[in-house]
Amino acid sequence: MKKFTDDYKRQIITELDACKTNLDRAVVLKREGLGHRQSTMFRRQLESARPLRRHRTLEEKIDIVAEFNACTEPGEKTRIAQREGIEPTTIYNWRKQLSSTT
């Protein structure tokens, strides 16, 4: 199966939105080797408030864990996790992993 970048998915969705008839849409989908379900999935992924899974570098994890550990106010850890788009438990797991490597 082909892998599509987010930019290319946006381009396909934009082209599909510009189509005036279902036949035009079918031509675009066939050209890209996609079905209706896949185009719907692309649209949901791109319009979703939750971004696609992101892999962070070790340096990014260290920075986030350090900021997380410095929290003193109630709810501050939750806000950091929300800002980063991850669950607080993920940060706790990173902290355990980082402490076991030192």
Image (tube, rainbow, N blue to C red):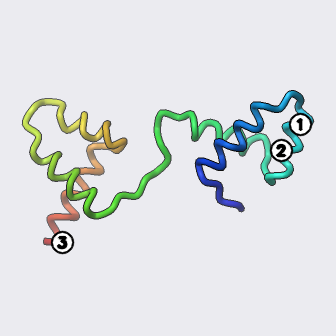
Q: Nearer the viewer, mark 2 or mark 3?
A: 2
Q: Which residue is mark 1?
A: 24
CA–CA distance in space, label 3 to label 1: 56 Å
The picture places residue 67, in percent across and down from the top left corner, at 16, 47
Residue pictured at 9% horizontal, 45% vertical: 70
Residue pictured at 79% horizontal, 52% vertical: 32
Residue pictured at 78% horizontal, 31% vertical: 18
Disc number for residue 85? none
- Judged from the image, the secondary structure of the residue bearing numbered disc 3 is helix
Q: Which residue is mark 3?
A: 101
Seen from the viewer's position, the closer of residues 51 and 7 is: 7
CA–CA distance in space, label 2 to label 3: 50 Å
Q: Which residue is mark 2?
A: 28
Q: Nearer the viewer, mark 3 or mark 1?
A: 1
Q: Residues within 10 Å of mark 1 (few under 14, many from 20)?
A: some
The picture places residue 27, in percent across and down from the top left corner, at 89, 44
Q: Residues within 10 Å of mark 2 (few under 14, many from 20)?
A: some
Q: Is 17 placed above or below 28 here?
A: above
Q: Amino acid at mark 3?
A: Thr
Q: Amino acid at mark 1?
A: Asp
23 relative to 52 in the view: left or right: right
Q: Amino acid at mark 2?
A: Val
86 relative to 35 in the view: left or right: left
- Judged from the image, the secondary structure of the residue bearing numbered disc 2 is helix
81 relative to 35 in the view: left or right: left
Disc 1 and disc 2 in contact, CB within 8 angstroms: yes
